[in-house]
Image (cartoon, grey):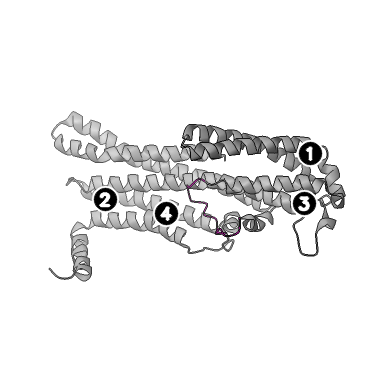
Amino acid sequence: MSPLSAKNAGQTGLNRTTHAVSSTSTWYAFAGQVNNRRSLLMNGGKLGGRPLGIAYAVFKLIAVWLSTRRLLRRLYWHPSRPGYEKLRNEIPAGQDTSVDLLSSAPSLAAFEIGLAQVRRMIAAGLSTSASEFAARISGVRDSMSNWLLQTEDKLGSAMAAYGQSRWRDEIQFKREAEDYMSALSKVVAEVYEPSWRGGTQPSPESKAKDDAPTALDYGEVYVASRVMDWLRQVMPQLEALAFSTTVAMLLMLFAISSYPFPTLDLLLWFSWAVVIVTVGGMVWMFVSANRDRVISLISGTTPGKTNWNVSLLMNLATHALLPLAVLLGAAFPERLSRLVSWLGGVFGGTG
């Protein structure tokens, strides 16, 4: 599953939100034209499509995450797995070593860490103490250096465009840098593949007494940096898709409660089914991502265990507790009104 697929999935979720925003006005139009059979059928057909849109968004959300999780499981069993824990040691001193993969804030940390490993590979290839690794890298040194320089040039252009608020140029330069980085990754894989397949280690004798990193460590951290960069593009798109789905679901519930339909009980039962399925799918996705071993190793949490951190609690509150509370309010409006009045009296005093 490519980052482009995840972006398309996020766009699909945003489209669902756009449709959901128009649902409230559609309900009011429906209420005002209830005596017109033709309008009743037309608006009823439009309204019936809203839950289908939500269901499709949930399907895309689960499908994208399942593809991502399958790839992460394969990456976990790759021989470069130790690099995920070493990756946090490459974060510059003074910065928080925890990595928030759900953050949509632009970051080039993974790029910079990966390029730093390539520079160390080239330097290690020139070392006489790493004879086996030097022999392996000698045939690709020029190619590696060329792709490295081109990537650094495009990355610098992207940073300059970002500083000047030229977002179109920034996107173009970043895309070109990704292409060069992909070509560079193929060269790195060519160098390290024999070791990862069980061959001779690149430079076991180059390990210093102070536990300094070896040439093999450079390859492991490089792979981890590319996985981190990929997740930084995929996970925010998944969260955006989940957010848009939640907003669409809430708007649907508000629309149902805005007009006293004769079959309101039937609509509420239908809403219960939609909300339970949607909330269950999103809770499973966020908990599964929280327990994922690769994501946990990069984020600095315990792999294979649920870590009740702020990010997980916020997602559960937004995508689970809030829709359920709105649904309960739509099903039992009088009781909810009493509860709100009671809470107002407790926190706001009497009056």
Instruction: Look at discs 4 and 1 and give the one toward the viewer.
Output: 1
Residue at point 69% right, 57% down?
Answer: 82
Crowd rating for badge 1 (residues with CA inside 10 Å; few <14, some 14–19, many 20+): some
Residue at image mark 2? 268
Disc nearer the start of the sequence (2/1):
1
Where residue 337 appears, as percent x and y from the top left, is 19, 60
Instruction: Look at discs 2 and 3 and give the one toward the viewer.
Output: 3
**Mark 1 residue type:** Arg
Disc nearer the start of the sequence (3/1):
1
Task: Tell me which segment is drawn in magenta.
Answer: 92-106
Residue at point 18% right, 64% down?
Answer: 341
Residue at image mark 3? 215
Q: Secondary structure at mark 4?
A: helix
Q: Is residue 156 left or right of residue 29?
A: right
103 part of magenta stretch: yes
Residue at image mark 4? 280
**Mark 4 residue type:** Gly
Disc nearer the start of the sequence (2/3):
3
Which quadrant would the N terminus be assigned to in this image? Answer: top right
Q: Is residue 330 above or below residue 172?
A: below
